[in-house]
Amino acid sequence: MVLRELGRYADLFTGYTELRVQENRTTAVAVVNGDVIGNHRQTVTGVSARAYSGGLWGFASNPDASHDGIRTVVKSATENARFLSGRENRNSGPLPSKPGRVERDFSTGKPRLSRKDIIGFVRSVDRMITAGFSGVASRTVSLQCLDMEKSLITSDGSSSFTMIPRTILYVSLTTDSGGEPVELRDVFGGLGQFEDVFEKPEDLAERLEQLREHLMRKAEGIHPETGERDCILDADLAGILAHEAIGHTTEADIVRGGSVAGDFLGKQVASPLITLVDFANEARGQTCPVPVFMDDEGILAEDAVIIENGVLKRFLHNRESALHFNATPRGNARAFNFDDEPIIRMRNTAILPGTGRLDEMIGSIDEGYYLMKPSNGQADSTSEFMFGVVQGYEIKNGRLGRAIRDTTISGVAFDMLRTVTDVSDDMKWSCAGMCGKKQPIPVGMGGPALKCRISMGGR
Amino acid sequence: MKTGREIGKHSLDAMRKAGLEKCECRVRFTRKDELNVDGGRFSLLRSTDDVNLFLSGIVDGKRGTLSINGTDADSIDEAAGTVMEMACSSETDSANDISPKQPPRSLEKGPDSPNLNLMYSRMQDFIDYSGTNHPSLILEQLILDFTNTRTFYMNSNGVDLASRTGRYTFFPMFTSKEGTDTSSFNYTGVSSLNLEENLHELGNLRSLMKQSTEQVRSRQFNGKFIGDVIITPDCLEDFLSIICMYLSDYHLIKGTSIFKDSLGEPVASRLLTLHSMPLSDELASGYHITSDGFAAENSTIIGKGVLNSFLLSLYGANKTGHTRSLNNGGALVIEPGDSSLAELIGSVEKGVLLCRFSGGMPSESGDFSGVAKNSYTIEKGKIGFPAREIMISGNIRDMLMNISGVSKERVNSGGWLLPWIVAGGLSVFGK
């Protein structure tokens, strides 16, 4: 439990300063082929301060969040800022400010389960696979729980206390296809502590059976044809496209580093069917997978519309980049651990639904692919992207055909999004995203299905 | 409690008192001083102190593990009780164990504190070098840190190991831009014990920066062929990480590793000898203590194409019946070949110089595909043009067997020492 009231330390600040006390608590259980090979808990707690002097930042952190520890990190952060500003002072002007007060706690109100109960749940899921599924040669069931609890004050008057938990269960099944292992996985869970996310193992039965069916079809599947093809990207792939290929190029630090998006503000960069939003905490009346109410610079969080009807509308900012671009910060400065400084991050990035129907979109393709689940994804400053695809089907004459084996899709996102000719009327969130950019950070990614042309990698 | 040994001793006593039969602990103190440049200008000086206390205990063959970063007596006593509760909640597994009695060992490498003024001036020199020699190159982010780590490992079998390492690490990330033409970003990571050299002289950085400015004018690659790919040392390290993943606990315990039946068998061309050398004096990085509580030793993973060793922990070894690895992998070194890089390039009729690979996670069967980034075509023995939207696919196992050349020249990043290699039979295709 972190210290909630930090206001009494504000008199230590000599210029613009942030003070944060944070505790990240993780629980991990891994069961491989019935054996508990991982049974771990971790608590990382401490205090950090970041001070601004002459246009430069100093940061310091310490696991000792006592009165003396807090005084020490504020002093060290201030000295670090002065080390730099003493060498090159900049007259950068005051940072934008949007102070407020936030208290949001997503802790469960239910009695906490014991460790034995939680391991028992994971093992029950594993037993459901062994008892009910034939043809599975190997299986992994692993649970990852993360509670992020933090208190923050800033010298311009913001304060917050938040506890944002996430509980994710990964299931991976492998079958044997002619001596060659073929794998498929699915992800369950999302926002909340274990007790609020999972009730009974049996609740997962239907999706586990679907996973097994897809795996068996994949084992008999084909390697897709290489080259550019008509494709339907299902929601999980649309979400990773929104995050990796577009979202990153519009982060203002990446823009300042040469991102191609820097030349596109106000221009048509995608089909008019595409609207892409980085949601702060609520989307379409529902709490987002990773709700952010105030960022780690003390900015009250708001949604950021990145692309509206195909036109690039804005970049994502922290206070400093907002000052540089004369823009408004919307709460995108986030830090993962207590000893991480806030940097520009996405929160819940999604392409908004359109009016199409998935079955009709598939029916409109004579020859192509329906791509359902990604593995990993990467993109760069040119918006050229690559995503691994682990689940998909060929489309022949408007109907789904054989499953495909693992492949890769690639393209230039700002080109590819111009090829979008239909967007489905539904939308799904992927809740297990962990974005890497100096630090890891949980993110939400979402979208509808998109009909587009995309380059497929084969064997 | 001030010292790692005092914390370790208290932790072992607390776990024994809690009822654990076998127990181990690792205490790690880390101090990092980090200079950041964003958009070509100094932005941040960051100093972090942390301590990580890892506790692991076994009772009735059941294990629980826990990490905290508080080291006061109350926190440790509570943590020891939690480890006991976690172990009791788990399942018996005869593979759970701790390392046996070994001679005490205490090793050090590198300085124990940074020279902040030198860090600042090296960073400023790098900014100046880039601006003078590569005006179109944008320094998106530079991170230069000095990290001092003190590690203590102790267990109930009487093992007592200590280590201290201190080194500078530099992570530059850059893109080149002329007008609206933009290169792909590129990056690397290099380490040094003393910052005696200018930062742009470390690893292959000078070459990567020059290439970045050329890649502003990249061209679309069209066509498809099966041919040779010359993999640069920076890119090779990514492929080696994947190979090491298949040799490690998870894939071998699961029984799905493509190398599970290959110990002692040829898995690569005879031209390839791959070591893991955490104790190498040639490398600035490395480590002295393994995660499973042994004094680390250097090892040969692949010797003249033959798989000599998996990368199994004590648990992984007990679980699979194979021999425990002498280290945790990493610090990878490949023996140099007989040909110069120029000769290797000259030998390729049609191929690609692969400088960075953005690939999907390979399948369990070793199939991979992805996009060649910051890369060049090779035509008739000569480097062609910087190309974009090239996809490359193949199979990890086939790729290793089809290595047809290893360069004499190697790049030392401080974290690895690797040559250029030629891998044949890979599919290359554009739009």
Image: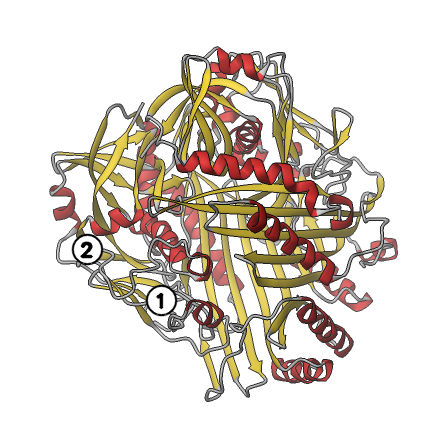
Callout 1: SS: loop
Q: How is the image coloured?
A: secondary structure
Residue occupying image coordinates x 54% and y 50%: B36
Q: First in sequence, mark 1 or 2: give its number.
A: 2
- Residue on which disc 1 sits: B283
- Helix, strand or loop for disc 2: loop
Name the mark nearer the viewer: 1 or 2: 2
Residue A57 falls left or right of residue B98 = right
Q: In this orientation, which residue lies closer to the viewer: A264 or B314?
A: B314
From the viewer's perspective, is residue B167 above or below residue B370?
below
For residue B429, above or below residue B327: above
Residue A225 seen in the figure? yes
Quarter of the picture containing the N terminus of chain B is: bottom right
What quarter of the picture does the C terminus of chain B occupy? top left
Which chain is indicated by disc 2? B
Dot 1: within a 10 Å radius of its alpha carbon, few (fewer than 14), some, or many (20 or more) residues? Answer: many
Q: Is residue B249 positioned above or below A244 on the image?
A: below
Q: Position of residue B56 (x, y in %)?
A: 61, 73
Q: Is residue B26 left or right of residue B103?
A: right
Q: Is residue B350 above or below residue B299?
A: above
Neighbourhood count class around disc 2 (C-alpha, 10 Å): few under 14, some 14–19, many 20 upward: many
Q: Say whether residue A325 is visible.
A: no
Q: Are marks 1 and 2 on the same chain?
A: yes
The residue carrying mark 2 is B269
Amino acid at the residue labelled 2: Ser
Residue B307, position as x, y percentages in the image: 27, 63
Quarter occupied by residue B225: top left
Q: Residue at x 45, y 26 (%)?
A: A393
Between the residue at mark 1 and the residue at mark 2, the CA separation in whole angstroms equals 25 Å
Residue type at tag 1: Leu
